[in-house]
Image (cartoon, rainbow, N blue to C red):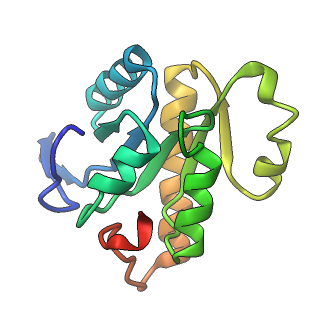
Amino acid sequence: MNGRLPNRICCSRENNVVSTCVHVALIDDVERRRMALARLLSSAGFQPAAFASAEEFLNHANDLRFDCLLLDVHLPGHSGLEVLRVLRRNGERTPVVFLIADQDRARHKDLRHAGVTCLVKPPDDVTLFRAITTAVDSSADNLRGEHRPAFGSSRYR
């Protein structure tokens, strides 16, 4: 993990405009891809926290809040699909963008029909940024005025 996020808002002043940062949990077991994606997200103004496995994410996510999860479908141990099931079963509605292999497109068509965004690995920069931003914006519209629970507590383990 890249470290705890003290709060959900980080401010940057660019042209006298204060903007909020989008906190993204990046869960991918391939270190090279995980680190490259984390650098890419950081360079675009996102605040990524990288995790090497579903278990690492679930074990270290206490008191953290994310605006979006960027989640590899194929992970050792708990798969990305299992992580999604656990989170949804426990009331967590943070949007998820799945990373899938090209040969998995047809197999994961049902995810897209369920409203989950799937991107073929490796996604191009613009498509990735757009997918995260769209997921976060859609979630904000749906959750306006509601309190989202933190990932913390043993219910995710």
Q: Residue furthest right?
A: 106
Residue at figure coordinates x 48%, y 41% from the top left: 70
Quadrant position of residue 150 = bottom left
User: In screen coordinates, is 142 left or right of 26?
Assistant: right
Residue at figure coordinates x 84%, y 42% from the top left: 109
Q: Quadrant of the C terminus?
A: bottom left
- Say above or below: 157 vs 144: above
- Say above or below: 64 vs 17: below
User: In screen coordinates, is 60 left or right of 4?
Assistant: right
Asked if one can make out residue 46 in the rendered structure from this viewpoint, the answer is no
Q: Residue furthest top?
A: 32
- Say above or below: 92 vs 31: below
- Say above or below: 52 vs 8: above
**x and y percentages locating residue 21 in the rendered image:** 26, 50
Residue at figure coordinates x 65%, y 32% from the top left: 119
**x and y percentages locating residue 36 in the rendered image:** 36, 18
**x and y percentages locating residue 73 in the rendered image:** 62, 37
Residue at figure coordinates x 77%, y 58% from the top left: 114
Q: Quadrant of the N terminus?
A: top left
**x and y percentages locating residue 5 in the rendered image:** 17, 53
Most foreground residue, 12 or 116: 116
Asked if one can make out residue 18 in the rendered structure from this viewpoint, the answer is yes
User: How many numbered callouts?
Assistant: 0
User: In screen coordinates, is 138 left or right of 25?
Assistant: right
